[in-house]
Image (tube, rainbow, N blue to C red):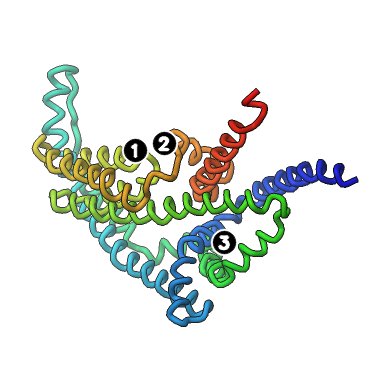
Amino acid sequence: MTEKREKALPYQWLAAIAGFCVLVYLLKDILAPFLIAGILAYICSPIVDRLMRLRLGRTSATLLVLALLTMVFVALLLIVVPLLQKEVLQVIQRIPVYFATARANLEPVLMQHFGLSLNMDMAQLQATLTEHWKTAGDFAGRALQLVSSHGIALFGWLMSLLLVPVVLFYLLRDWHGLVEHIAVLIPRRWAGKTGEIARDIDLVLAEFLRGQLSVMLMMSAFYAVGLWMAGLELAIPIGLIAGLLGFVPYLGITTGIILAVLAAALQSGTIGALIPVAAVFGIGQLLEGMVLTPLLVGDRIGLHPVAVIFALLAGGQLFGFSGVLLALPAGAAIAVGLRHARKAYLASETYLE
């Protein structure tokens, strides 16, 4: 009887895991706020633990961390949003100048090789852009129209946004208790190996999430400041895009270079304007690859760039935005499990025979 139960146990666990995966897939549309809160709780839990060493209660430390996160979020909105708005306004106002520069540089080449001419009415283009910008400036009317036409979707989005701090509070406050409750459910004969794998996963995720987030923020600031010093008008949005997309190998730097080169070419129309842009991204790559990533992330992640790209695409295809959030942590955890499985296989009789 005991042997039958032991043989049935793995199948029961496989059935439970399969049922859990199906449940997650069915609930994918409401997972985003919970995943965001879970990732933030995992990142911030050590901060709460350190605050508790200052003789603060768990609840008080959690509230303090939430207040700090809120202040950072509000500060970013108050600083970044007006700057982005100002930059976009400047670009819209200068689009006719960009077209004129492009025409002056491209039309001779097109006329010489293809016999084509770029005939544009710049005055009409300027008038159209100005009219649409003034119409877009009626923010209150646009907002009321959006609420009336998409009220349910907007309400759902706002509820999901407000749900993040609520879930984050409870996860941070009860983090260690939740981990202990999960650990109790693990069969005792698997507890040792499961604990070893969990500690390895924790090391990987800690280095990846906390380290990569720090690298992304630092590189966003570096690219924005560097491109601004290089005289690029779209320095802030391009710098933010290049830095924040850095969690996907080569995507952030490639996107940033393309956008910066196009912006610099339209802004000045000379090859010389591309030199400081190239210098900023060259120094940025050296700083990220030789200083920030080895110092803050390390080499313990074990995910090949191709595996990272596949994980992001697969997560987005299966679960949408929630899948993108979960793709890299899940991929890192799976990589740890595969390393342990490979180690067990190489030591097994099946391999050694």
For residue 305, which numbered disc appears in the image?
Answer: 2
Image quarter of the C terminus: top right
Which is more foreground, mark 3 or mark 2? 2
Q: Residue furthest right?
A: 1
For residue 250, which numbered disc appears in the image?
Answer: 1
Which amino acid, mark 3? Gly
Using the image as rendered, state which of residue 137 and residue 258 is in the foreground: 258
Mark 3 surroundings within 10 Å by alpha-carbon count, few (fewer than 14), some (14 through 19), many (20 or more): few
Residue underneath mark 3: 156
Q: Secondary structure at mark 3?
A: helix
Residue 9 placement, left or right of 161: right
The residue depicted at 29 percent of the width and 53 percent of the height is 220
Distance Cα–Cα, label 3 vs label 2? 35 Å
Which is more foreground, mark 1 or mark 3? 1
Residue 25 placement, left or right of 304: right
The residue depicted at 16 percent of the width and 17 percent of the height is 113
Residue 301 placement, left or right of 242: right
